[in-house]
Image: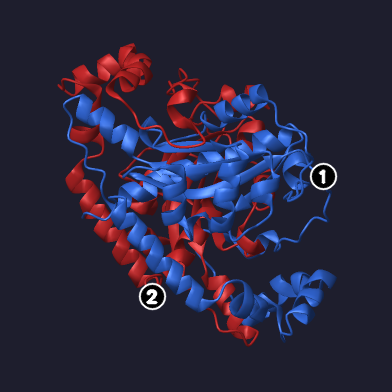
Chain colours: A red, B blue
């Protein structure tokens, strides 16, 4: 297990070999055994294997090529629709049209997603998280025909690896973990924690390619820019309203 | 792996045996190898082992006894503080004081959490998710001394199992999974999907204990009530504002 978890890499190139249906079912079953709030299972998983559907999803994920090239695309959704409908059928008045319920459902969805990743990787499959799901949720809702009460929160592409990329870096564990209370980060500590990341050849290449002065500027000025973040924040909040999660 | 993932149970009773420091470090290392948005690792993990600190956290988790009885309590936080401080140190202007950035960081935190769960369970440890973290985030922030840019999103209790509870039910996989597009739930399908859950002895006992007519009513009228959900939604949205995530 340690070997599996410590030596993993995100896989963005897949062979043309399909993922066996039985294997996919087993992976999803394992995902659905994960912890879930009050055993409500307030999430859904949409499987996309159809090429036409993948082509419709691709631009909503900024044309990241994994979306059309992976044999399987899985969209994980916060979903109170099923639970609400069950409540109504059973003379119970659901009260889940609010932000807390969205967060509960989103967390349920992500917990299942990560179990699916580990299950898939344990079988030799490769996975990639597609973070654009929450940027373009309103459009994904249209393509996947998601009703009120359902919001896509993340997407996985899944397939047999056709690459073995270098493993990327991580911050030292002590940069992430705090004992008893949070210890805020001094400049000295930041220097220490980011030294390895900043010293890497790929980081230096990244800075040069983007004509920036520091690695941090590649994030703030190129990859995750404030105007984009603000735009997509407002879009996402509107999605939560439209899907019925902001009625407090 | 299938056996581990399919036969798991949430563990709420722990033996007094401590969790070895080296083992805990390895588990956290494995958690921190999980996928993270743009390799930013925008989360932190607070370890609580001190009994006094556990006693301070307990009421914020509605006195669920796992919080004081488990040898280890882990609070997983969405954290842009470290990243923002690094940006500022490196002549980069962070633009992460918005809702999208909170969601990104919350998802990073949950992904790491679930890997920690599986890693811990693979070593024979038992875990329990404590969902109250987002209800009482404002108070947890005080106890753990979390600065602006940091929001606790979930908590795990961790220890050696002192129980082997019956495994709880799950909905059939076809209730969760949709092919290509979302198929909304007819009454007939809901009857089929919830039949096993509603037929279980523990469900019937739950209904009787709470003097309700249906299992769904136990959720809507007792466990997850609308007025509570609204109250904690507003509290949580205020936390996001206070911690600097709603500046769009």
Question: Going by the picture, which residue comes out furthest to the front?
Answer: B52
Q: Please tell me which residue lies in front, B181 or A94.
A: A94
Q: Residues within 10 Å of mark 1 (few under 14, many from 20)?
A: some
Q: Quickly name the residue at label 2.
A: A248
Q: Please tell me which residue lies in front, A226 or B6.
A: A226
Query: In the rendered image, which quarter is residue A24 located in?
Result: top right
- Name the chain letter of the residue that bears numbered label 2: A
Q: Is residue A144 left or right of residue A117?
A: left
Q: Please tell me which residue lies in front, A75 or B157.
A: B157
Query: In the rendered image, which quarter is residue A116 located in?
Result: top right
Q: Position of residue A245 (x, y in %)?
A: 41, 70
Q: Is residue B33 left or right of residue B97?
A: right
Q: Is residue B210 above or below residue B231?
A: below
Q: Residue at x 45, y 37 (%)?
A: B44
Q: Residue at x 44, y 73 (%)?
A: B230
Q: Residues within 10 Å of mark 2 (few under 14, many from 20)?
A: some
Q: Position of residue A124 (x, y in %)?
A: 63, 29
Question: What is the CA distance from the residue labelled 2 to the residue labelled 1?
Answer: 41 Å
Q: Residue at x 31, y 17 (%)?
A: A198
Q: Is residue A187 left or right of residue A24?
A: left
Q: Position of residue A58 (x, y in %)?
A: 36, 47
Label annotation for residue B222: none
Q: Quickly name the residue at label 1.
A: B162
Quadrant in which the C terminus of chain A appears = bottom left
Q: Residue at x 16, y 20 (%)?
A: A213
């Amino acid at each position: 297990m340690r070997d599996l978890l410590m030596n993993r890499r995100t896989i963005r190139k897949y062979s043309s070999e399909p993922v066996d249906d039985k294997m996919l079912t087993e992976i999803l079953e394992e995902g659905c055994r994960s912890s879930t709030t009050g055993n409500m299972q307030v999430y859904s998983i949409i499987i996309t294997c159809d090429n036409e559907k993948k082509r419709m999803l691709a631009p909503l994920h900024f044309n990241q090529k994994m979306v059309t090239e992976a044999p399987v695309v899985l969209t994980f959704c916060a979903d109170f629709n099923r639970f609400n409908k069950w409540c109504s059928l059973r003379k119970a008045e659901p009260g889940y049209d609010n932000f807390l319920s969205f967060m509960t459902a989103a967390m349920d969805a992500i917990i299942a997603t990560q179990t699916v990743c580990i299950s898939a990787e344990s079988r030799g499959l490769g996975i990639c998280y597609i973070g654009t799901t929450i940027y373009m949720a309103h459009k994904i809702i249209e393509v996947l025909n998601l009703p009120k009460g359902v919001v896509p929160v993340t997407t996985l592409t899944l397939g047999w690896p056709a690459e073995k990329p270098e493993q990327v870096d991580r911050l030292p564990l002590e940069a992430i973990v705090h004992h008893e209370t949070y210890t805020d980060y001094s400049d000295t500590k930041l220097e220490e924690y980011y030294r390895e990341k900043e010293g890497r050849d790929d980081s230096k290449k990244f800075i040069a390619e983007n004509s920036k002065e520091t690695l941090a500027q590649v994030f703030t000025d190129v990859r995750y820019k404030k105007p984009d973040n603000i735009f997509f924040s407002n879009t996402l909040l509107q999605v939560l309203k439209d899907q019925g999660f902001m009625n407090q």
